[in-house]
Image (spheres, grey):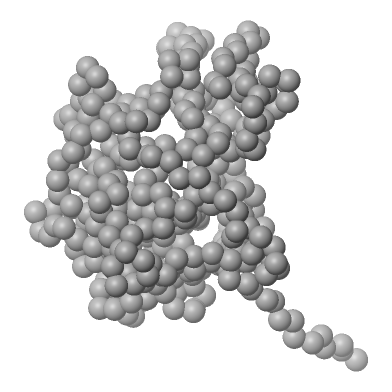
């Protein structure tokens, strides 16, 4: 005799989101830039707050063909991109960009939940709208990536350098990156559609208008930021061929709402929603780069080819630091770093070292903060605060 279990109802509680009913972006929830920069030089684009337009219950994320200048941070210097575009920074580090885009990036971090966006795709060549989660060590869940010129396909993807990107799949257990174009019988240009994603400890599910369209089995165990916006592709890069003389500017990716649900209790969610936030001026010209917060190491490999490890540390907008590591080879085990207090308490130490972006905020404290680096047995210590 079989025992049939009763149905189980899993309760989701609304925990966050934005209906975009105000006259401007809610700065308590969003910033109109990446945490580390406003520019993406590989795409020749600058993300401007002027390209995020809230009106009549919609947020419009605009891409325009317009020239602007930005001061590049040390980790943005990419000789291959400079050569491809035929442009280089001037002696002061200023760099000319040809396009501007619009995006929003959550101030709050998330870990698991149900995420949803209602949107309309722009019918325009070379545009790259997206809705995704991004966080420590470049872990990324792409709930949706679109190409402006394709009206019936949606792309889903997972990026997690710690290993889940190379999941085992297939009859012979071969390793394959997760990422798919999903064909539909609809037209993303003609009206609004809803993309949702359920992120749980051991899987990610992807939904289009309520229908399950993709499933990833794997573990992503870090806090992630939520973001959406509109950018551009370029010839030879991801989502090529990119913009052309057929692209009409300006062009908008339109979002009706973003909604987030959680399995946490309503009481716990309400407590988190009533936290105090601090808004600071984010004008790029006022960003601080103290001299002692830019550290560069040079290491000669056995092949006699010089290897440069660069660790850049900048003050976080609220309370903490943003760190960017470049030139690090995972085979090198002679480099570590951490943030410590004056009493020796470890405030942050990466669990995995790789070329990536790290972000750490911590409780307000009057204690001094130090960056401690151990490089080939020598300890370097720099006061940050």
Asked if residue 96 can be seen in this view, the reply is: yes
Asked if residue 172 can be seen in this view, the reply is: no
The answer to whether residue 162 is above or below residue 54 is above
Q: Position of residue 16 (x, y in %)?
A: 54, 64
Q: Position of residue 168 (x, y in %)?
A: 60, 53
Closer to the camera, 86 or 57? 57
Q: Quick one: which residue is furthest to the right in this view?
A: 1
Q: How many marks?
A: 0
Closer to the camera, 120 or 332? 120
Left or right, 351 with respect to 29, comes to right
Q: Quick one: which residue is furthest to the left in this view?
A: 245
Left or right, 143 with respect to 331, comes to left
The answer to whether residue 254 is above or below residue 86 is below
Q: Residue at x 29, y 72 (%)?
A: 56
Q: Residue at x 29, y 56 (%)?
A: 52
Closer to the camera, 378 or 347? 347
Question: For the C terminus, which image quadrant?
Answer: top right
Q: Position of residue 302 (x, y in %)?
A: 51, 10
Q: Position of residue 370 (x, y in %)?
A: 61, 20
Question: For the N terminus, which image quadrant?
Answer: bottom right
Q: Residue at x 59, y 60 (%)?
A: 273
- Residue 59 figure quarter: bottom left
The answer to whether residue 193 is above or below residue 296 is below
Left or right, 157 with respect to 146, comes to right
- Residue 155 figure quarter: bottom left
């Amino acid at each position: 005799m079989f025992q049939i279990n009763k149905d189980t109802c899993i309760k989701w509680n609304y925990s966050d989101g934005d209906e975009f009913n105000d006259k401007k972006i809610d700065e308590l929830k969003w910033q109109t830039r990446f945490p580390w920069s406003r520019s993406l030089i590989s795409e020749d684009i600058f993300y401007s707050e002027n390209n995020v337009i809230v009106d009549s219950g919609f947020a419009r994320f605009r891409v325009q063909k317009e020239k602007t200048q930005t001061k590049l941070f040390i980790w943005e210097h990419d000789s291959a991109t400079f050569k491809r575009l035929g442009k280089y920074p001037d002696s002061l580090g200023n760099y000319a960009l040809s396009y501007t885009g619009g995006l929003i990036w959550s101030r709050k971090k998330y870990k698991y939940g149900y995420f949803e966006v209602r949107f309309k795709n722009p019918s325009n060549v070379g545009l790259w709208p997206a809705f995704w989660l991004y966080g420590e060590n470049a872990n990324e869940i792409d709930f949706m990536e679109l190409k402006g010129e394709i009206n019936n396909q949606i792309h889903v993807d997972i990026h997690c350098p710690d290993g889940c990107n190379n999941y085992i799949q297939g009859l012979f257990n071969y390793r394959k990156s997760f990422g798919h174009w999903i064909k539909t019988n609809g037209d993303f240009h003609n009206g609004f559609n809803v993309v949702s994603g359920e992120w749980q400890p051991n899987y990610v599910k992807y939904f289009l208008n309520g229908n399950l369209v993709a499933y990833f089995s794997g573990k992503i165990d870090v806090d992630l930021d939520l973001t959406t916006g509109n950018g551009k592709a370029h010839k030879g890069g991801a989502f090529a061929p990119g913009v052309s003389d057929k692209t009409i500017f300006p062009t908008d990716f339109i979002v009706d709402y973003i909604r987030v649900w959680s399995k946490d209790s309503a009481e716990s969610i309400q407590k988190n929603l009533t936290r105090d936030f601090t808004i600071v001026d984010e004008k790029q010209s006022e960003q601080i780069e103290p001299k002692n917060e830019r550290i560069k190491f040079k290491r000669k490999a056995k092949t006699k080819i010089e290897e440069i490890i660069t660790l850049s540390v900048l003050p976080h907008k609220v309370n903490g630091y943003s760190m960017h590591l470049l030139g690090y080879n995972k085979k090198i085990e002679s480099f570590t770093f951490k943030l410590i207090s004056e009493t020796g308490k470890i405030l942050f130490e990466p669990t995995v070292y790789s070329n990536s972006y790290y972000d750490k905020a911590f409780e307000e404290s009057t204690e001094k903060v130090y960056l401690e680096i151990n490089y080939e047995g020598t300890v370097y210590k720099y006061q940050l605060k």
